[in-house]
Image (spheres, grey):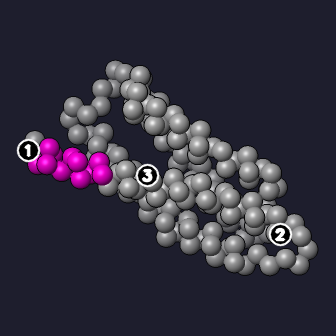
């Protein structure tokens, strides 16, 4: 069994990195679409239907599957013996940041529904929220690479 885990580990880790990249790309882009959608909706008579379609497809076809694969492969990596030392700070800081990233994903999903219903925050607010995944990415990458 240990030989199988050793053999599969680099493949699971590679899939995890690819899924994280896809998920992060969506988390960076979806709030930017919200900015344009909210600002277009604020102008009377401006069409926003194309934003609704782009937001929905980005979330449902790219972000949701990428988040699920990220979580599944991440859990496989964490459960691999000898990979994580829970006596250190870094796995805990990464775990908190990943949970916050998941919360942000859910926040984006809720905002997509609200925008579709015509209830938007301001473009400025979406611009500010667009920085959340960047801050979380810093915590995650530093945690994994520096291993403090």
Picture layout, residue 134 above or below residue 111: above
Q: In terms of secondary structure, what is the magenta stretch mainly?
A: helix
Stretch in magenta: 3-14
Look at the image and tell me whether residue 114 can be seen.
no
- Pick whichever of labels 2 and 1 is earlier in the sequence: 1
Q: Say which label, 2 or 3, has the lower sequence index.
A: 3
- The location of residue 84, given as percent across then percent down, is 30, 31
Element at label 3:
helix
Q: CA distance from mark 2 to mark 3?
A: 31 Å
Residue 101, picture quadrant: top right
Numbered mark located on residue 128 in the image = none
- The image position of residue 13, as x and y in percent, is 29, 48
- Find residue 138 and report its horizontal and vertical position in percent: 53, 36
Q: Which residue is mark 3?
A: 20
State the residue at coordinates (15%, 46%): 5
Please report whichever mark, 3 or 1, sits nearer to the chain's N-terminal start.
1
Contact (Cβ within 8 Å) of mark 3 with mark 1: no
Q: CA distance from mark 3 to mark 1?
A: 26 Å
Q: Quick check: 17 left or right of 53? A: left
Which corner quadrant holds the N terminus? Answer: top left
Give the residue number, with chain letter if any, for mark 1: 3
56 above or below 132? below
Q: Position of residue 119 (x, y in %)?
A: 80, 64
Question: How many neighbours does mark 1 have within 10 angstroms: few (below 14), some (14-19), or many (20 or more)?
Answer: few
Compared to residue 141, the image places residue 106 above or below, namely below
Q: Regarding mark 2 in the picture, which secondary structure is present there?
A: helix
Q: Is residue 88 magenta?
A: no
Quadrant in which the C terminus appears: top left
Which residue is identified by label 2?
A: 41
Q: Is residue 78 visible?
A: yes
Q: CA distance from mark 2 to mark 1?
A: 57 Å
Quarter of the figure with residue 31? bottom right
């Amino acid at each position: 069994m240990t030989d199988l885990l050793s053999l599969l580990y680099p493949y699971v880790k590679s899939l995890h990195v690819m899924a994280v990249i896809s998920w992060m790309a969506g988390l960076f882009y979806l709030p930017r679409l919200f900015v344009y959608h909210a600002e277009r909706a604020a102008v009377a008579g401006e069409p926003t239907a194309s934003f609704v379609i782009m937001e929905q497809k980005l979330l449902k076809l790219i972000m949701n599957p990428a988040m699920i694969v990220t979580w599944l492969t991440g859990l496989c990596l964490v459960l691999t013996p000898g990979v994580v030392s829970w006596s250190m700070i870094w796995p805990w800081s990464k775990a908190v940041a990943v949970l916050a990233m998941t919360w942000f994903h859910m926040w984006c999903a809720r905002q997509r529904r609200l925008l579709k219903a015509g209830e938007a925050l301001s473009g400025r607010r979406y611009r500010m929220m667009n920085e959340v995944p960047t801050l979380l990415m810093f915590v995650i990458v530093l945690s994994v690479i520096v291993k403090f």
